[in-house]
Amino acid sequence: MVHTVPMTTTEKPVRQSVSLPPRLARRVRTLAKTQRTSTNRVLVELIESGIESREAEKARFFELADQLGASSNPVERKRIKEKLARMTFGE
């Protein structure tokens, strides 16, 4: 489960309308039912998780780019370049 940071008492939630494809909406409802929570809570947790994942991926990319710049070993540089290419362009 994703650790969420509770809103402070001064923060007001922002109402946001989102249209979901039917298949995805069913999956969200199923998750909510399984977790015994609201679909809203499931959506918030999924969005937070997705944002955290993207931020971690970005941090990993820059970490690899730094390693590439610092490495003088041709084999290591090739390995890092391949990882960066996979991250950028996929498999």
Image (cartoon, rainbow, N blue to C red):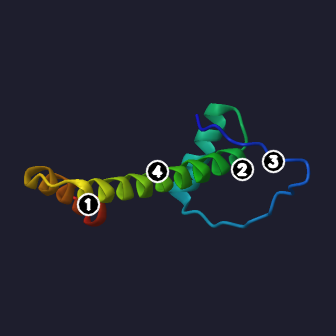
What secondary structure is found at the residue carrying circle 4?
A: helix
Q: Report which quarter residue 57 is drawn in.
A: bottom left
For residue 68, above or below residue 32: below
Q: Residues within 10 Å of mark 1 (few under 14, many from 20)?
A: few
Give the number of the mark in front: 1 or 4: 1
Residue at the image point whose x is 57% and y is 50% from the top: 26
Give the number of the mark in front: 4 or 2: 4
Give the number of the mark in front: 3 or 4: 4
Q: The C terminus is located in which quarter?
A: bottom left
Residue at the image point whose x is 82% and y is 57% from the top: 13
Amino acid of disc 3: Met
Instruction: Of the two numbered discs 3 and 4 on the same chain, state the one appearing first in sequence.
Output: 3
Q: Position of residue 15 (x, y in %)?
A: 79, 63
Amino acid of disc 1: Gly
Q: Which residue is mark 3?
A: 7
Amino acid of disc 4: Ala
For residue 56, above or below residue 14: above
Furthest residue toward left:
75
Instruction: Of the two numbered discs 1 and 2 on the same chain, state the one appearing first in sequence.
Output: 2
* Distance Cα–Cα, label 1 vs label 2: 44 Å
Q: Report which quarter residue 33 is drawn in.
A: top right
Are the two marked residues, 3 and 4, in contact with CB atoms closer than 8 angstroms? no
Q: Which residue is mark 2?
A: 40
Q: Position of residue 41 (x, y in %)?
A: 71, 45
| Residue 56, disc | 4
Q: Position of residue 11 (x, y in %)?
A: 86, 55
Q: Residues within 10 Å of mark 3 (few under 14, many from 20)?
A: few
Amino acid of disc 2: Asn
Q: Which residue is mark 1?
A: 69
* Distance Cα–Cα, label 2 vs label 3: 15 Å
Q: Residues within 10 Å of mark 4 (few under 14, many from 20)?
A: few
